């Protein structure tokens, strides 16, 4: 009777499994409800600064924050994947408020679209808007 060959995995496969487990465990530490503080400075053209506070949820490493209800003026969704090392590029989209707070005094209800470079560590995080307007983001998890 011929002997059956047993399939074996390469040695590196086990190391990848351990690394994936560690990464998913680390990413899981970001799970839950977060508070977001978004502070956008006055622009050089004179558009007024503003501060927004809102909640966000992280599930499966996916961050979703919502300022006011979608479709309200103003409103914004901030979302993206938090990587195992705590870094994230979040995408903001929504509808702007009154012209005096908008870049180049764009009319109310102008679409909002920008990215935020963020870093999460433990129960806190910070981020900065990428592009033309200086906005700082502070994330905290109770």
Image (cartoon, rainbow, N blue to C red):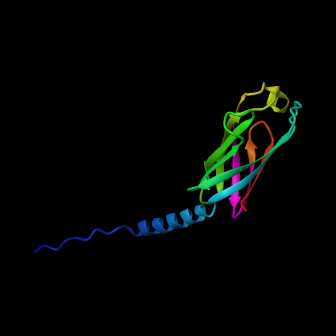
Residue placed at 47% from the left, 65% from the top?
Answer: 16
Q: In front here: 106 or 16?
A: 106
Q: In front here: 71 or 50?
A: 71
Q: Looking at the image, is 69 positioned above or below residue 8?
A: above
Q: Residue 68, percent across and down?
A: 72, 41
Residue placed at 28% from the left, 68% from the top?
Answer: 7
The quadrant of the rendering that contains the C terminus is bottom right
Query: Which of the 4 quarters of the picture holds residue 112?
Result: top right
Query: Which of the 4 quarters of the picture holds residue 133?
Result: top right
The magenta stretch is 113-127
Q: Residue 51, percent across and down?
A: 82, 44
Q: In front here: 65 or 24?
A: 65
119 drawn magenta: yes
Task: Count the marks.
Answer: 0
The quadrant of the rendering that contains the N terminus is bottom left
Q: Looking at the image, is 72 positioned above or below residue 118?
A: above
112 drawn magenta: no
Residue placed at 85% from the left, 41% from the top?
Answer: 41
Q: Residue 35, percent across and down?
A: 73, 54
Residue placed at 58% from the left, 62% from the top?
Answer: 28
Query: Which of the 4 quarters of the picture holds residue 33?
Result: bottom right
In this view, the residue farthest toward the left is: 1
Give the dominant element type of the magenta stretch: helix, strand or loop.
Answer: strand
Q: Is residue 108 left or right of residue 82?
A: right
């Amino acid at each position: 009777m011929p002997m059956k060959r047993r399939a074996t995995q390469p040695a590196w496969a086990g190391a990848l499994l351990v690394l994936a487990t560690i990464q998913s465990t680390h990413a899981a530490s970001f799970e839950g409800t977060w508070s977001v503080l978004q502070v956008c400075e006055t622009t050089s053209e004179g558009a007024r600064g503003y501060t927004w506070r809102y909640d966000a949820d992280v599930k499966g490493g996916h961050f979703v924050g919502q300022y006011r209800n979608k479709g309200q003026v103003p409103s914004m969704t901030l979302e993206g994947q938090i990587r195992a090392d705590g870094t994230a590029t979040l995408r903001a989209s929504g509808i702007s408020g009154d012209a005096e707070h908008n870049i180049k005094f764009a009319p109310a209800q102008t679409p909002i679209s920008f990215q935020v470079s963020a870093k999460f560590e433990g129960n806190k995080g910070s981020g900065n808007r990428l592009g033309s307007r200086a906005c700082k983001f502070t994330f905290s998890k109770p």
